[in-house]
Amino acid sequence: MQGILKIFRIIRDSSNWNRLILLLLLPLPGFSALSCNIESPIPALQNGDAIDPYYITGSEETRETIRSLFILLADEDSVGMGQFTVIREIANTYMKQKEYSKLINFLTNRVNLYPDDPYNTYYLFMTAYAYIQKDAYPVAALFFDRIIKNYPDMTILGESIHLACLNQLITLVDNSEQQVWYYEELISRFSDRIDLGATYFMLAQAYEKTGEWSGAIRAYTQYLPFVGTNVPGFSNADNYAKQLVDFNNSAKNWTFDTLGALVNAIKSALDAGSSSRLEQYRAKVNFFTRTWEQEAADDSGMSDFNLSDFMRQSRIRYSPDLDAGSNANEAYLRTYGWSQYISTWYLYFRKIYFPQDPEIHGRWEWAGIYYGEKF
């Protein structure tokens, strides 16, 4: 009973990864190698093969425990729960002693000798965990990947080993194509056990890095119903996904080949006092209006923004040249004479980043307005 209560406390108090590791290392309730009436010291296995001294380590008590466990393992003449119970205790003993190299050698040799053992998933998972303890993260990732691609899943007290492997792989592996596969696996197999919104966003990010923009847009679209999700490292995830999806679904007929052509068109419309022409030139999605103070925090658009309301009985003027803060990807044009409360507006132009459509990628758009003098 005490063993079961201990398990429930671990389930309640630990994170998913740590919980699974602790569950794997818990001694099986009622099992004790020294309670099996095996005399010690025992120099050899019952089948006559000597115990490899490499595996006998630790204090005298620990050494006798390991000898006893190897004898028990030899007594189990068929692959199954009996052998698994003993191997689990051997692995647990090495883990407690931080004998990670011995643990790795023991478990990998076991898998090689018995490739059809149904518990190999567990043995390889513990091998990967041992490599993490040795800070050998690339090697650990290879084992996690090997498990999910070549071995059936195992559930230990409700915790999936495959799920734990995937969660480790998305942090250990930098290859974007592999990350796409891992995120897809998480979504298709464990959608009820993960933060689905955050996973869709990270899948889209991985697709972006591979250059598969159709996959990225699809994943961002799937993310949108989860607006408000906390995506670690992406405080602006909602607006980022929405802007890309909206732009993808738009006509994009307001864009210009060059910045010069766009600025000349804007100046011509201002000279003519034509709000209708200006409306044609401004972006129809993701267009923003904000003060300079709002720049870091507010990416909101203004779909109901009407330029004619600010041009009545006013002649709008502009600086002859672009603002000195302009660069190869962004530009600002100072204008003044607008009605209402703030007469100075900086029109903001940006180069479009949209590799999915080569005809649009690299063109320019009038993307927003900053109110007031620049500071």
Image (cartoon, rainbow, N blue to C red):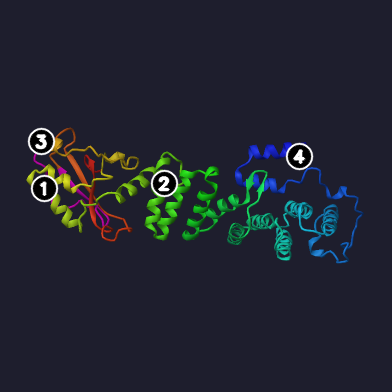
The answer to whether residue 11 is left or right of residue 198 is right
What residue occupies the far right of the structure in this picture? 39
Query: Gap in Å between the C-alphas at discs 1 and 4?
Result: 79 Å
Tell me the tag on residue 28: none
Q: Secondary structure at mark 1?
A: helix
Residue 135 location (% of width, % of height): 62, 58
Q: Of the residues shown, which amino acid type is indicated by label 1? A: Ala
Q: Which mark sits nearer the N-terminus, 1 or 2?
A: 2
Residue 147 location (% of width, % of height): 62, 58
Q: Of the residues shown, which amino acid type is indicated by label 3? A: Arg
Query: Gap in Å between the C-alphas at discs 1 and 3?
Result: 14 Å
Query: Gap in Å between the C-alphas at discs 1 and 2?
Result: 40 Å
Q: Split into 4 quadrants, where in the image is the C terminus?
A: top left
Question: Which residue position is annotated with label 3?
Answer: 312
The answer to whether residue 306 is left or right of residue 98 is left
Question: Which residue position is annotated with label 4?
Answer: 3
Question: Which residue position is annotated with label 2?
Answer: 222
